[in-house]
Amino acid sequence: MERPNWAPGDIDLERPSVARVYDYWLGGAHNFAADRAAAEKTLEAMPEIRTVVLNHRAFLRRAVRYLLGQGVRQFLDLGSGIPTVGNVHEIAQAADPGARVVYVDLDPVAVAHSRSLLGDNTQVSVLQADIRDALGVLSSPEVTKQLDFDEPVGVLMIALLHFVSDEDDPWGIIGRYRDRLAPGSYLAISQAGYDEDDVESSASVRARRIYDRQVTQSTFRNRTELGRLFDGFTLVEPGVVRVPAWHPESPADVEEAGRRFPGFAAVGRKE
């Protein structure tokens, strides 16, 4: 396979990545044949997956706007992925040109394109790192030079934690980020999952098996389990809800499709 000129030389073109499969579902062009094949097989089993990822992306926009309304002007976007329209810094700097953002992702394509997107924007930094290494992320020059942890910071974990297993201790990971935050900081999470009394469709089960086998293992969590990830934060209204129902932009977001959405979202404030 010919390597595109935008692809870093150490990328395995034959191995799908979470960021690039997600990019394909969002209609992006920075993905390889292996990513597209895995994405299409998942779509065959569950065609609505594209709508699902678009809803997580829409929650990101709503959460950032909410945090801006609370006076937050610094953002740490963990597992930021490949840039698409409506990036955190575009939303934040439209409200305040002085807003600062750090993007963190492990995928080298996501990092390379985030950096190319920024140009001479000195208010934004990009870090290639594993978000599970919270202490490494927080001590990196990209973070320490850009963010002032004596002031509120908005930490974003959008469509991320279903790729962090319970064995990786997401509670401890979040706790290490939380302990570094000043009071008045916020945490926003969206997470794939179903409620305790939901019946997961056979299509969803097939899609999960394909994705787990070809891309990476995922860990679905229910509403209660997501709420436990906010230990040390006070949930803001409406608490933990289906992704489309968090500060919905349209009544349709809370109708039947929204009530059955396979994932939850919430925002919490550190007091």
Image: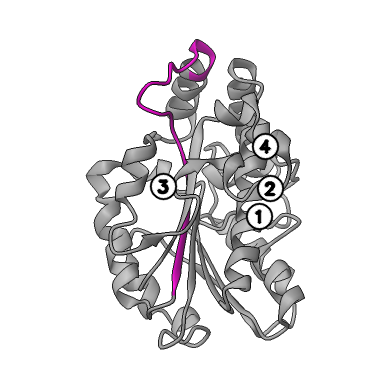
Gap in Å between the C-alphas at discs 2 and 1?
A: 7 Å
Mark 3: amino acid: Leu
Q: Position of residue 75 (x, y in %)?
A: 54, 72
Closest to the camera, between mark 2 and mark 3, is 3
Check the picture and name the quadrant holding the C terminus: bottom left
Gap in Å between the C-alphas at discs 3 and 4?
A: 23 Å
What residue is pinned by disc 2? 3
* Residue range of the region highlighted in magenta in the rendering: 185-204
Residue nearest the viewer, comparing 243 with 98: 243
Mark 1: amino acid: Ala
What residue is pinned by disc 3? 161
> How many labels sit on residues?
4
Residues at badges 2 and 1 in contact (C-beta under 8 Å)?
yes
Residues at badges 1 and 4 in contact (C-beta under 8 Å)?
no
Gap in Å between the C-alphas at discs 1 and 4?
A: 37 Å
What residue is pinned by disc 1? 7
What residue is pinned by disc 4? 253
Counting residues from the start of the chain, the first of labels 1 and 4 encountered is 1
Closest to the camera, between mark 2 and mark 4, is 4
Closest to the camera, between mark 3 and mark 4, is 4
Q: Position of residue 175 (x, y in %)?
A: 28, 64
Gap in Å between the C-alphas at discs 3 and 1?
A: 26 Å
Residue nearest the viewer, comparing 258 with 42: 258
